[in-house]
Every structure is written in C-alpha cells, then in structure tokens.
Image (cartoon, helix red, strand yellow):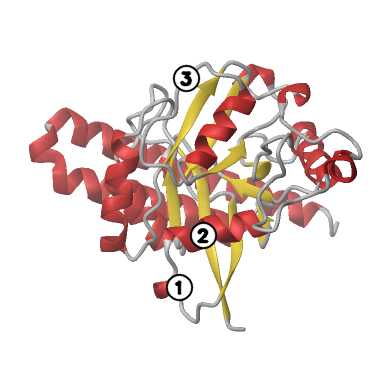
Amino acid sequence: MSSVTVRIDLHVHSEDSYDGHEPVDLILEHAADIGLDAVVITDHDTMGESRRAAELAPEYGLIGIPGVEVSTAHGHLLAIGVDRMPPRRKSYAETVTWIHDHGGIAVVPHPFQRSRHGVRRRHVPVPEPDSDAADGGDTADGRDSPGEIDEVDAIEVFNAWLFTGYRNRRARRFAALHGYPGVAASDAHHLNYVGRAFTELTVRGRTSVDDVTAADVLAAVREGTTSASGKRAPVPMAARHYLVAAGRKSGYYARTGVGRGTAAAVRGAAEAASMARVGLSQGVHRFGRALSWFR
C-alpha cells in the first residue's frame, strides 16, 4: 500500500489566546515556509481563529485542521479536529468522550507539569490492569467494549517549551507504558517557536501530501503512525529558523501596517529584529561550545 509522510505542529497559539502574540495569517505563512504540512491553532478555550486558520490553510498549501486547548477540571487537553468548543471544566474523562463523540482526537499536552496546567497522572483515563481480558477486549468495529474507559488518543511526549527536561522524559515513559502514540509540538506562543517541535505522520493509502485530508491526519494519530521530532537543531538550521521568522514577521507587518496602524508595524519590526539577534546569538553560542569539544 502506498503511503506518504506529513509534518505537523499540533499545538500552536495565536493572538486569540490570552498569552498568544501572532495573527493566524502570519503563522500559516511561516509554517508553509519552513516545510510543515499542517499547523493546528490550539488557542485557550476559544476557537474563532482556529476555525479561520483551518479554512485559510489550503491557500498556503497546508492541511486545514481546527483545534483548541480546553481547560478541564483536571488540566489542559488538546481537542484536535473538532469544529466547536468542548464544554469547559468537565472531568478529563468526560472531555475525552465529548471530543470522540464530535469526531476529534484527544491529545494530552505537557502532561504532569502542574505549573502549566498539565494533568496529573491519576486523572488521565487509562484502563485498569487486565481490563481487556475481563471485559472481552474491543468490539468487532474496533470501538471499546461496554464498560471500558474512553482513552486519550496520544500523549505529547516532546513539548518544545519543556525542551529535554524531566517532564518530557516522564511523558515518554507514560506513553510507552500504556501504548499511546507519542507526538511532538512546539506549543508556540511566538512565531520563532512554530515548528521547533513537530510530529511526522505516516498516512497510508495516499501518494502525495496534496491528497492528505484532515480526516487522514486524525486517523494516522489514532493508528499510532507517529514519530516525534524535537531535538535541538544544528546551528545553521536554528539560525535559519529565527531569521526566516524575523523576515516573515517584518514583511507581514510592513504589508498590513497601514490597516493595523503605524504602532503595530513598528512593534512588529522591533520584535523581528530582536528575534534575529536572539537567533544569531544562540547560533554563535552553540558554535563556540561545539568548537570547545575539539580543544
């Protein structure tokens, strides 16, 4: 059977989030430029810009997938592929069921990090030991048997904000223990973080990325054909990432400055310049550290 690999950043925030900064048009433009095939806008408890981004995505050569980061009673949860807002402050298990009932997938973001509203381990709905044997396993159509718990679809095992910390390692162990697919995402709130981590998905039955639909992406996650990518980028790649973001942001505000106001244009140019300086500084620092290994 034919297959194709797509790269997707499943966890990105726009200016529609209380802590986001970027317009979705700019995020989509940047995602396409750095080689992503899809980016899911997952703002906090709001879906207006995410739905708009999903509609605009094909204009940038991207797969359009709506999503949201919903606040449950036990922590944040990503609802990917839903077109309406899940109820807030429900239990984790109830929210997972709601997402499935509305055709989406439930992904656990930055698990166990309470300072960022990550869910505690005990609240992630997982089957009890030997429950499959007791209940007879799955039904013929592949859905859970009556009485079985409605599980999440994937675990965010690499969050770029956490980078290589303890919480990422703990998330990987949890996913491996329970057999959940692992995904990586940037959790970007600024443009230069978009794509810093992403998930590669193998989509079966397609020969070209152009043929891949949002439904195909959701199915690939459910099937577990995922590969998490989020290792520290080589110096040239890191520098290019920052510089491309700086150029894109500067160009965007230059084009929209009249409509958005001079202050916004100036602020955007200043942020772009700052991003470029940060990228170059990090590149020099990493290069110097690499040279020290050979002394």
Residue tagged 3:
88
Question: Badge 2 local density, few (<14 within 10 Å), some, or many (20+)?
Answer: many
Going 27% across and 52% down the picture, which residue do you hit? 55
Q: Amino acid at mark 1?
A: Val
Question: Badge 1 local density, few (<14 within 10 Å), some, or many (20+)?
Answer: some
Q: Is residue 15 left or right of 43 when viewed as pictured?
A: left
Disc 1 from disc 3: Cα separation: 34 Å
Q: Amino acid at mark 3?
A: Arg
Residue 76, visible in the rendered structure: yes
Q: Amino acid at mark 2?
A: Val
Is 196 drawn above or below residue 125 in the view shown?
A: below
Q: Quadrant of residue 201?
A: bottom right
Going 46% across and 79% down the picture, which residue do you hit? 208
Sequence-first tag of 3 and 2: 3
Question: In the image, which disc is placed on residue 217?
Answer: 2
Residue 244 x %, y %: 40, 55
Going 70% across and 38% down the picture, which residue do you hit? 146
